[in-house]
Image (spheres, rainbow, N blue to C red):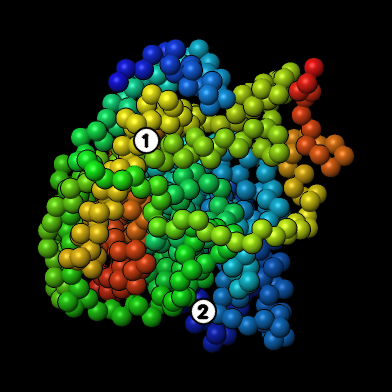
């Protein structure tokens, strides 16, 4: 499968990444190489096989929905690049 | 023998007989870190001064009878993707350069409960993506056997530190070989447990259906002991299995008579270095001599496994790494006006090139139009891989392969060619895809004196079988007695 520059830029946009002009060619070549290599999965005899999403067979692991107080709230906020009055601060969203 | 040459079980004996003290042990390691870190570059954060203080207090508590236990005062190193309360957890990424976890990972909590001493956080490929530790944003760790070569990755700091005697043992994490391959490159023992045996709570997620934490140690006995400490169900990780606790050291019987070993022939063919193949052949002969039955068979998924792994791992990574947005924690760009600018610029400036490459690949295989051709297909191949292994384990107790197709390569030789770097994982990824346990044990050195590792693969939750097979082999070839890293420059 051939990947176009436009496609790469679209994918980067979906992933919230900006690619610099000099990065584009490099990523395009890498992506093309890796995808060509990955094509081999289409030769695998998988007719009729289901999809495995995890290594173990657990599904729907339930627990009671109980509130557990996290004591060190300050430490949580201290990792934020910007905070104010116990909240994460971001630029104005609604104009 | 010097303190830093001892295994943990040897340290325990000497501590028990009061031949040495907890303080002396930690001091010896702290000094060794000071001596060797300049050459090896294994740590992102060293805690040697804090560790010596902690050792003093633990020594006093032991003397006062306040704490007991076989592991009180034993030092350890932790890969820098496991959360340690109050100490930076960077994932070797600019994105988390100043991140201080507000809580401990479950594995770290378990170590703290036993009063182990943290010597520091160990270097890795950024977000565990890589096979050489060259993709760390901070430093390139060197292989103690030859400082011009890589230690492997992504747990390269952990493996190099154990090999260099800078920590007695360490925790690593393994998504596609990241414990086993660096263990192989550095001549130490690395165990990736069955998926679900060890809690992933507090491990920064790379590919959640593949990630597993495990021990990197000097020998197999230490590996079993560290697995004892970290295994167990955790309600904070719904994928951790609720199964009875075992004492894995009890499995180390030193006897493999009647053990059925399968040799998947695909991992002895093209692409595997001749010297590696020859050492593996010797290992097979050793097992035969020890009374095991060895048989070659065909594991038909070998051709597809690596591609399947990279599709699944990158898809999961692209989703997991979506959380890094410059808002709640992590790097925030200085260059923004809108909220969208914060997301995009923080991620573009905070992630390194390999991480971005994998996010792009993962986003691509999950995107509309390509999902069926890549991601869905890979999930089906995953079913096939599990089926093939199930069949193999009907016939064999353990499978034996090389851990890596080569010995440690020179720094800078693969870092610019991503696909070539991915091939370093060819022998290890099928184990993660199927959620199996795998252990890498040194089986000799090549003509240049570089360690060669072999991988034993077991069925789910059959760690005992691979540990015993590894232990029995280790007792026979006595790798640690015969070879030592020389810090060649």
> Residue, x 36% and y 48% (percent of image)?
A52
Say which quarter of the image contains residue B28.
Answer: bottom right
B158 relative to B100 in the view: left or right: left
Residue B402 percent across, percent down from the top left: 25, 53
Is residue B429 visible in the rendered structure shown here? no
> Residue, x 69% and y 39% (percent of image)?
B329
Question: Could you classify mark 1 by the number of other residues whose Cα lies within 10 Å: few (under 14), some (14-19), or many (20 or more)?
Answer: many
> Residue, x 18% and y 48% (percent of image)?
B300
Residue B281 percent across, percent down from the top left: 15, 58
Residue A24 percent across, percent down from the top left: 46, 16
Q: Chain of mark 1?
A: B
> Residue, x 66% and y 70% (percent of image)?
B55
In the picture, the quarter occupied by the N terminus of chain A is top left
Residue topped by disc 1 = B375
Label annotation for residue B145 = none
Residue topped by disc 2 = B12
In the picture, the quarter occupied by the C terminus of chain A is top right
Query: Quick one: A11 or B88, which is closer to the camera?
Result: A11
Q: Secondary structure at mark 2?
A: helix
* Mark count: 2
Is residue B67 visible in the rendered structure shown here? yes
B164 relative to A75 in the view: left or right: left
Q: Eyeballing the image, is B367 above or below B472?
A: above
| N-term-proximal mark, 1 vs 2 | 2
């Amino acid at each position: 499968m051939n990947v176009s520059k436009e496609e790469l830029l679209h994918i980067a946009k979906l992933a919230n990444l900006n690619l610099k002009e000099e990065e584009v060619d490099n990523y395009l070549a890498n992506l093309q190489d890796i995808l060509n290599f990955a094509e081999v999965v289409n030769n695998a005899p998988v007719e009729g096989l289901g999809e495995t999403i995890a290594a173990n067979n657990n599904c729907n692991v339930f627990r009671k929905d109980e509130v557990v107080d996290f004591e060190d709230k300050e430490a949580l906020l201290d990792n934020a690049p910007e905070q104010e009055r116990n909240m994460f601060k971001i630029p104005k969203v609604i104009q | 023998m010097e303190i830093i040459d001892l295994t943990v079980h040897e340290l325990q004996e000497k501590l028990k007989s009061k031949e040495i003290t907890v303080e002396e042990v930690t001091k010896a390691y702290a000094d060794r870190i000071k001596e060797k870190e300049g050459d090896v570059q294994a740590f992102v954060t060293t805690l040697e001064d804090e560790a010596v203080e902690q050792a003093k207090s633990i020594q006093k508590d032991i003397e006062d009878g306040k704490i007991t236990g076989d592991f009180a005062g034993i030092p350890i190193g932790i890969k820098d993707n496991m959360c340690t309360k109050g100490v930076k957890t960077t994932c070797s990424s600019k994105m988390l350069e100043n991140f201080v976890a507000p809580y401990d990972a479950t594995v770290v909590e378990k170590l703290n409960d036993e009063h182990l001493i943290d010597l520091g956080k160990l270097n890795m490929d950024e977000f565990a993506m890589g096979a050489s530790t060259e993709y760390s944003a901070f430093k390139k760790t060197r292989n103690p056997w030859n400082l011009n070569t890589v230690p492997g990755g992504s747990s390269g700091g952990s493996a190099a530190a154990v090999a260099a005697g800078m920590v007695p043992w360490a925790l690593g994490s393994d998504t596609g070989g990241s414990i086993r391959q660096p263990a192989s490159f550095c001549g130490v023992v690395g165990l990736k447990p069955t998926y679900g045996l060890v809690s992933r709570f507090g491990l920064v997620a790379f590919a959640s259906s593949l990630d597993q934490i495990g021990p990197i140690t000097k020998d197999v006995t230490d590996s079993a002991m560290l697995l004892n400490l970290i295994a167990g169900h955790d309600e904070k990780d719904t994928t951790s299995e609720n199964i009875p606790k075992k004492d894995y050291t009890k499995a180390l019987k030193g006897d493999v008579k009647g053990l059925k070993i399968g040799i998947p022939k695909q991992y002895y063919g093209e692409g595997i270095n001749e010297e590696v193949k020859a050492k593996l052949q010797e290992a097979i002969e050793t097992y035969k001599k020890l009374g095991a039955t060895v048989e070659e068979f065909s594991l038909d998924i070998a051709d597809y496994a690596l591609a399947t792994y990279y599709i699944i791992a990158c898809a999961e990574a692209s989703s997991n790494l979506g959380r890094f947005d410059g808002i709640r924690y992590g790097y925030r760009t200085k260059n923004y006006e809108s909220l969208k600018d914060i997301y995009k610029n923080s991620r573009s400036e905070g992630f390194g090139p390999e991480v971005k490459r994998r996010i792009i690949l993962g986003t691509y295989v999950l995107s509309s139009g390509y999902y069926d051709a890549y991601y869905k297909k890979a999930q089906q191949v995953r079913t096939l891989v599990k089926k093939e292994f199930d069949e193999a384990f009907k016939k064999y107790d353990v499978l034996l392969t090389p851990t890596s197709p080569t010995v440690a390569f020179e720094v800078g030789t693969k870092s610019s060619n991503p696909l070539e770097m991915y091939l370093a994982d060819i022998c290890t990824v099928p184990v993660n895809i199927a959620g199996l346990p795998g252990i890498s044990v040194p089986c000799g050195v090549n003509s240049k004196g570089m360690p060669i590792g072999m991988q034993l693969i077991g069925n789910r939750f059959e760690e005992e079988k691979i540990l015993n097979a590894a232990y029995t082999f280790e007792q026979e070839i006595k790798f640690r007695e015969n070879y030592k890293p020389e810090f060649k420059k």
